[in-house]
Amino acid sequence: MKTLLTNYGMILVLIALCALFSCLTIKEQTPTGTAAAEQLRQRVEAACKKDDIILIVGAARKESGTLAEAVAPELVAAGFANARTVVGEPRDLRVALDELQATGQSPAAIVTAGDVMKWRVLERISQTHPAFAKAQVLVPESYRWPDFLKRSNLLAIVDRIVVIAVIAIGMTMVIITAGIDLSVGSLIALSAVVGTMVMKQMGGLQAGPGVVVVGFLAGTLACGLVGGLGGCIVAQFRVPPFITTLGIMMMARGLAFMITGGFSVYQVPKALAWLGQGRSLAIPNTVLLLIVLYVGAHVFMAHTRLGRYIYAVGGNEQAALLSGVPVKAVITFVYMISGLAAGLGGCIQASQLNTGTPNMGVMFELYVIAAVVVGGTSLAGGSGRILGTLIGAFIISVIQNGMNLLGMESYTQQVVLGAVILGAVLLDKVRSGKQVTAFFARRQQLRNP
Amino acid sequence: MKTRTWIAVVCGVCLSTLMVSCSKKQPPEETGTTPEPAPPAATEAKGKIGVTCMDLTNPFFKLISNVMTEEAAKVGYQVVSLDGNNDPAKQNSQLADFAAQGFDAVFLNPVDSKAAGEGVKKLNAAGIPVFTFDVQVTDDEAKDMVTSHLGSDNFQGGQLAGESMMKATNDTGKIAVIGYPEVTSCILRVDGFKDQLKKANSKLEIVTELSGKGNRNDGYTVATDILQAHPDIVGIFAINDPSGLGAHAAVVKAGKTEQITIVAFDASPAGKQAVFEKKLYDSPQQFPRKMAQGTVAAFIKHLEGETIEKKIFIPCSHYYYETSVDDESRLAEQW
């Protein structure tokens, strides 16, 4: 436990953030289960006679709609023959009310829940349909539960971070070698555009899943190639990675615009959506993909020779070289992996949006770097953990999601996100202050033996 | 020691977030006449409406977002306005957040007409009505899920511009068009302009049609080139104020202000001022305020169960020197 906390201390920040947002987003929720349906049946039995007209109203595809569909058979079974169900939009309720009025009947009770109560049709019923004003409105007891912890929201958190988290794997490796890769944001666009263009050329809307795979491969490999080229330049010619990848960043973005002529590519097969939006074994593919990639990357970095080489190169390049580590090959390799990861990220993004757009992924490189650094990887190289990066990515995603749930203004959001990233890293540094001092002392020694 | 530092981390993060989130819950508009209760306003609000625009740093959208906030507050709804940052992916995760939290409605100004379709599908699956404004969603599946669209009638605005151009030039001579063919609304403006000339059997001849990319710099450059190739033109139609003002600068430089009439579009504050200074002859006016009010009104109608038109277009109107003289909004409004 203690080692877990020292290694992945940021997980506490993540948990604290989740707890905070859970507390702040607690809200009345509409129950949908059988208990609520049962409760409503009892209330109707208490309030109405068997031959009364009862309107059961729910909003389409919302909790109240599910509840309405659960209550209706209960009431019919209990002998209320004149129960009518309206599940839809406010317009549908209005039409139902108008029809009732036309036949001169009036409902004894309106059974409903949640957001239907906010429909102005109901609020204004005494003005539009004065005869119905005395109808009782029966609602179930609501319960309190945070919006943040709803299943759909937790999935939204994964969905928003999956692209950044995937790319952060490559970025972690690059940063561990004391490098940086600024091109990943543009490579997202390049990969998405190349991939969708290939799909468009190979049949577009009518094409099958095979074409999608070809498109993804084309996009990912193109980016891997670009990343590998950048790595070569860094390793062979000692061009600083910042400049090399800055150049690639501009070229890749420009290429993406050139390939599409500035427009988005939407003539894509249906199967494209599978990766970013589909499910396998009832688990979203994005979640599965994250698990597989992170477990793989963790094992690779912690338990293989090449993985240890990456740490060695970042820790002390000279020493690594002297100990027989193929430094140039390792550096080229990490930039290639970073390019491949960015390419895969672009495919996921294209799949989530069902489109390839040349303006995708602007500024993503900075979010990715933030995720890696928040996850505890040192920009000075030589140390860092893959799983830490995952935690870092989730911290960023949770903050963004939480702020949207709280309805914080866009401008403020940027300030808060920046402050939290900075604060988290700052405190991590204070914690590991001793290690940092030791690191610089070591460097000093190397320079002045 | 370690534990203590960690407690400090957690507390620090919590505090900073809390502070900001609380400060946000102040009423956004200090109207004075209707004092809103401060922090509990969020919980007491009847519901929340999500708004996301393509670019909140553009004053046009900032104004729309502000007016929507005011209008929605009148009926008890809180508006959460987010900036799409011209990034379709960012906008889509914003739409996903709106869907996850079960907002009561979403007002959407898509960054990308096609990509926004995925977000609209998510909202639709969560039973949340979507209202688009200014730009439509064109994804085949998603466009039918949009409850209502409200935008300017750019074609009709272009016709107005054509009318003015004919009036100002006595309907004789050569003219140039500075367009922006990457943007649908601007294409419609030019189409409307040409349609008007054709309908009226105009003797005006369009000698060239180039892109000014909707900004002052490119408007200036392209107008300079036009004046080189066609020094005898009598008029220029530019699809918005910045490119129109860029063209004006080029005309001034060539010393042809007497010879050439410029008609622009939008009547943004800068454009209104230019009309007042007689730099532009006309700038058919768009109504961002009406667009915002109309969108909120459509949502209310939806809640009332009224039938809503699928697409509503607000007609543009002329903005001449005579209009500008008495127009207080020329100086008062900021967008």
Image (spheres, rainbow, N blue to C red):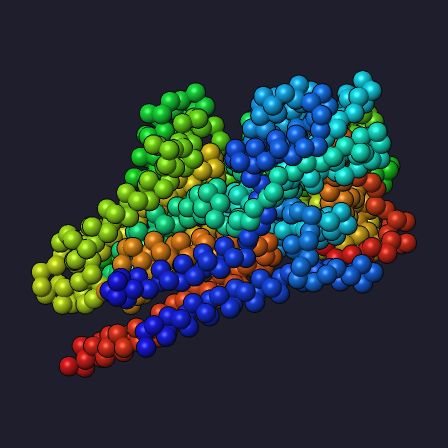
| Residue B163 in picture, x, y percent from top left | 83, 35
Front in this rendered view, residue A412 or B280: A412
Question: Does any portion of residue A157 appear in the rendered image?
Answer: yes
Front in this rendered view, residue A214 or A59: A59
Q: Is residue A104 left or right of residue A137?
A: right
Q: Which residue is pictured at 82% across the width and 40% down the height?
A: B317
Compared with residue B276, is residue A426 higher up or lower down, i.e. above or below?
A: below
Front in this rendered view, residue A158 or A53: A53
Q: Is residue B48 left or right of residue A205?
A: right
Compared with residue B147, is residue B244 higher up or lower down, i.e. above or below?
A: below
| Residue A398 in picture, x, y percent from top left | 45, 54
Front in this rendered view, residue B67 or A247: B67
Q: Which residue is pictured at 59% across the width and 54% down the height?
A: A407
Q: How many marks?
A: 0
| Residue A151 in picture, x, y percent from top left | 46, 43
Q: Give the quarter of the figure containing the C terminus of chain B.
A: bottom right
| Residue A52 in picture, x, y percent from top left | 73, 23
Compared with residue A91, is residue A166 higher up or lower down, i.e. above or below?
A: below
Q: Which residue is pictured at 50% across the width and 55% down the height?
A: A22
Q: Quadrant of residue B40?
A: bottom right
> As drawn, which residue projects farthest toward the bottom?
A448
Q: Give the quarter of the figure containing the N terminus of chain B.
A: bottom left
Q: Which residue is pictured at 34% across the width and 47% down the height?
A: A166
Question: Does any portion of residue B221 appear in the rendered image?
Answer: no
